[in-house]
Image (cartoon, helix red, strand yellow):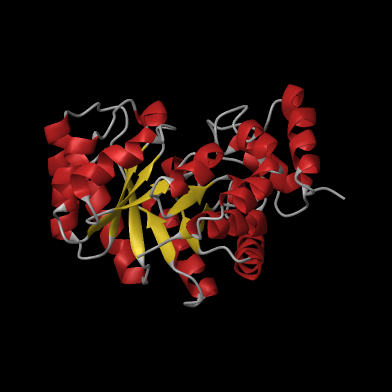
Amino acid sequence: MFSGSMVALVTPMQADGSLDRDSLNNLIEWHISSGTDAIVAVGTTGESATLTVDEHCDVIRQVVTQVNGRVPVIAGTGSNSTAEAIELSQHAKDLGVSGVLLVTPYYNKPTQEGLFLHYKAIAEAVDIPQILYNVPSRTACDLLPETVARLADITNIVAIKEATGDVSRVKAIKSLCGDNIELYTGDDANTVDFILAGGVGAISVTANVAPAEMHAMCEYALAGNEQAAKEVDQKLVLLHERLFVEANPIPVKWALAEMGLIQTDLRLPMTILSEQYHQPVREALNAAGKLN
């Protein structure tokens, strides 16, 4: 249903914490002109955890309006509260998104049965394509392939964003699910290998600063052209690494500010990139040809 380079879009903010609407619209236009295949609004990279429900919906509304059907818009609507995830997913559907991305419940550390029932409840409550999102390093729980297989039998659960960094998960999930579910990587550094192993795209942080390159890399990998994909990827290796020197989205927002595209501002408890990391991130931007 969705494939290629899907940007986990940052949410530009003013110094007072309010939404920077002009920068958001400009980023959307840049992504569309650069070939980005889908836009993920207010995912975890979009600072969803520090937005109110009203703000969350406001960002989705603006992205859907600005995109105007030119590429799919996927809304991050996950929560560690099943009821809140249902509420956000229903709002996103009403606003016209193409699908929703649902991070595993963080902090709660649910059992596999709890994860199954959580996602089942959301799928039954909101009739919209739904993407599971597994990122154990941030949530303290791991959505295992066997549980994914149970969820894949639910019609509107269409894909999973796998951010364990383990490419072998592709084979494990596909062996259990067949074609019932699509796989996207959430780890930019393994995008080429992930797609060649059977994935169909990336929900990407690196795409925030290198959208054309991530699109080309995914396109080559989907066509089976490993050499061309890895040639593109070579320019991005430092970005994949250094956009995570501090917690996401701290480095990527600083990088975009260096490129003159947004301000550096984030919501507390996130803070601006520490000075010791400025030069390493600049080096990564230079290596990718992103600074004049």
The residue lying at 25 percent from left, 55 percent from top is: 87
**Residue 82, above or below 156:** above
The N terminus, quarter of image: bottom left
The residue lying at 78 percent from left, 44 percent from top is: 258
Q: Which of the pair 191/10 is nearer the observer?
A: 191
Where's residue 2, x and y in %?
Answer: 40, 63
Q: Is residue 248 visible from the viewing direction of this image? A: yes
Where's residue 174, x and y in %?
Answer: 27, 46
The residue lying at 31 percent from left, 70 percent from top is: 94
Looking at the image, residue 128 sits to the left or right of residue 240; the answer is left
Looking at the image, residue 162 sits to the left or right of residue 259; the answer is left
Q: Which of the pair 169/241 is nearer the observer?
A: 169
Residue reaching furthest to the right: 292
Where's residue 252, x and y in %?
Answer: 64, 41
Q: Which of the pair 227/221 is nearer the observer?
A: 227
Where's residue 193, x and y in %?
Answer: 49, 42
Residue reaching furthest to the top: 276
Q: Which of the pair 268/145 is nearer the observer?
A: 145
Residue 74, quarter of picture = bottom left
Looking at the image, residue 225 sits to the left or right of residue 251; the answer is left
Q: Is residue 104 visible from the viewing direction of this image? A: no
Label total for image = 0
